[in-house]
Image (cartoon, grey):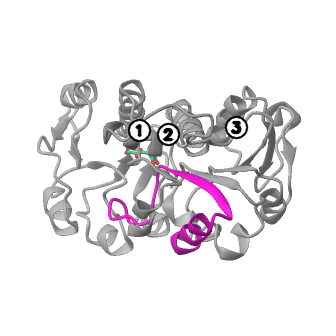
Amino acid sequence: MAAQPTILVTRKLPEAVEARLQRDYAARLNPDDTVFSADELISRAAGADGLLVCPTDKLSAAVIERLPQSIRIAASFSVGYDHIDIEAAQARGLVVTNTPDVLSDATAEIAILLMLGAARRAGEGERLVRADGWTSWSPTFMLGRQVTGRRFGVLGMGKIGRITAERARSFGMEIHYHNRNRLDPALEAGAIFHDTVDDLLRHADVLSIHCPATPETDRLINERTLALLPAGAIVVNTARGNVIDDAALIDALRSGRLYAAGLDVFNNEPAIHPGYRTLDNAFLLPHLGSATVETRDAMGFRALDNLDAFFAGKAPVDRVT
Ligand code: 8YV
């Protein structure tokens, strides 16, 4: 029997995923779940055939260049792959795969949670109850905004954007979207297309961000574009922090021009811009988009399907390079 390929697994993965890894591969696991430095990653990868990485591993051009020659594939446990320098991977002949589809429902759930949490002041209310600061009911106590009937603007109408739109529709929201390409009517499902980001923003009472982090989307939501949103709008981000200019969003929240924001992703996680913590109208979660038992298992299995295909000499379904 041929020797099993050796896989360096950079983070602790769900039990069922690690069991399959250990069954089918010579797996180098990370039971302590420490985040490897670049040097550590490179030295632990010595002699291995592939990597199973997470967004916490920054595979920059410099790191990719220093990877042992034996490493031929990096399967990421994520749909986003902005932590990997794709051009450098391509140049080195490193195959990169991701895990699309399986986390779309979980991420859409978090986007809706963020919208409702921001609109109905859930964070503020929860903090008050815990601090024993809730004294009585009153007709004017902690009033929020209703989202029913409002316009839901989707920036990036991929799978996650479309599922989130479908959920928002059940609140009677009117769906607007911008995408690089207009979708087929069947996928649009009645959503109103805007051919520019600016035009979408002018029509979004709630803006939900679902585009990938690319040079084109970097700081796309900034002082100028935030000013296009209707007064009192809500911004929701489950995509990547770097789509937002933090200082500009914090200013707009502080001044009250925006009603609230619901954020699951940030620049420089977990060391987020401290300004967010000072704002009652910022509803904040620690990057929980795909964090359900079912989804994290499915992501691990999808990454393993990609590795299995690669080592069987087939094309991995989710190959991005
Ligand atoms: C997870 C994500 O944090 O998949 C992504 O791109 O941002 C998240 O859902 C990530 O997958 C964890 O590995």
Note whether ligand 1 is within 8 Å of mark 3. Answer: no
Determine the secondary structure under disc 1. Answer: helix
Amino acid carrying label 3: it is Gln
Q: Residue at x 53, y 54 (%)?
A: 281
Amino acid carrying label 2: it is Ala
Label 1: few (<14), some or many (≥20) within 10 Å?
Answer: few
Question: Looking at the image, which is closer to me, 47 or 176?
Answer: 176
The disc at residue 146 is 3
Label 3: few (<14), some or many (≥20) within 10 Å?
Answer: few
Question: Looking at the image, which is closer to me, 245 or 275?
Answer: 275
Q: Residue at x 42, y 29 (%)?
A: 295
| Residue 218: x %, y % from top left | 58, 70
Image position of 316 with respect to 194: above or below = above
Q: Quarter of the image containing the N terminus?
A: top left
Question: Looking at the image, which is closer to me, 203 or 128?
Answer: 128
Q: Would residue 263 be counted in the magenta stretch? A: yes
| Residue 207: x %, y % from top left | 69, 52
Determine the secondary structure under disc 3. Answer: loop
Note whether ligand 1 is within 8 Å of mark 2. Answer: no
**167 to the left or right of 135:** right
The disc at residue 192 is none
Q: Would residue 265 be counted in the magenta stretch? A: yes
Reading the image, the residue beneath label 1 is 126
Q: Are marks 1 and 2 in contact (CB under 8 Å)?
A: yes
Q: Residue at x 39, y 30 (%)?
A: 292
Reading the image, the residue beneath label 2 is 122
User: Which residues, given as a range, are shown in magenta?
Assistant: 246-272
Amino acid carrying label 1: it is Glu
**38 to the left or right of 246:** left
Distance between the alpha carbons at the discs numbered 2 and 3 = 13 Å
Choose the circle earlier in sequence order: 2 or 3. Answer: 2
